[in-house]
Amino acid sequence: MKAYEEIVEFIAGAVDAGKLRSFHPLKAAEVRVAALLEKHKQGALRPAEREELNEFLRLEHVMRLAKARSRKLAMMSA
């Protein structure tokens, strides 16, 4: 088991499945990430911005895994 899988399992089991699946970052966060990605493409990210982008991408990955796990749990209980 990977270290983060316990967190994924917890989120998938603890959060209302409908709320989890419908979660999306606020528009302001999406705009910020788009700006960071554009700066990344241009090779203009400062170290703090690179870390911010990497943190967002890691959290987004965990949320995607939790959403997928939640869907699987829902199918298993149906």
Image: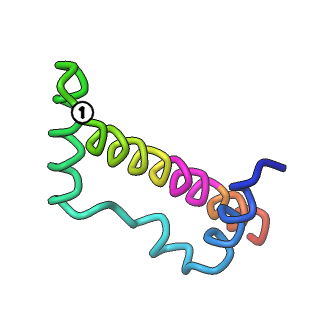
- Residue drawn where x is 56% and y is 73% of the image: 17
Percent across and percent down for residue 9 are 71, 65
Label 1 residue SS: helix
- Counting labels gives 1
Q: Residue at label 1?
A: 37
Percent across and percent down for residue 24 are 33, 61
- Residue drawn where x is 66% and y is 61% of the image: 8
Residue 25 left/right relative to 2? left
Location of residue 3 with respect to 49 vertically, above or below: below
| Direction top: furthest residue | 42
Does the magenta run of residues contain 66? yes
Q: Quadrant of residue 78?
A: bottom right
Does the magenta run of residues contain 17? no
Nearer to the camera, 32 or 8: 32
- Residue drawn where x is 17% and y is 29% of the image: 38
**Label 1: how many residues lie within 10 Å, few (<14), some (14-19) or many (20+)?**
some
- Residue drawn where x is 42% and y is 49% of the image: 55
The amino acid marked with disc number 1 is Leu
| Direction right: furthest residue | 1
Location of residue 37 with respect to 22 vertically, above or below: above
Q: Which residues are magenta?
A: 61-68
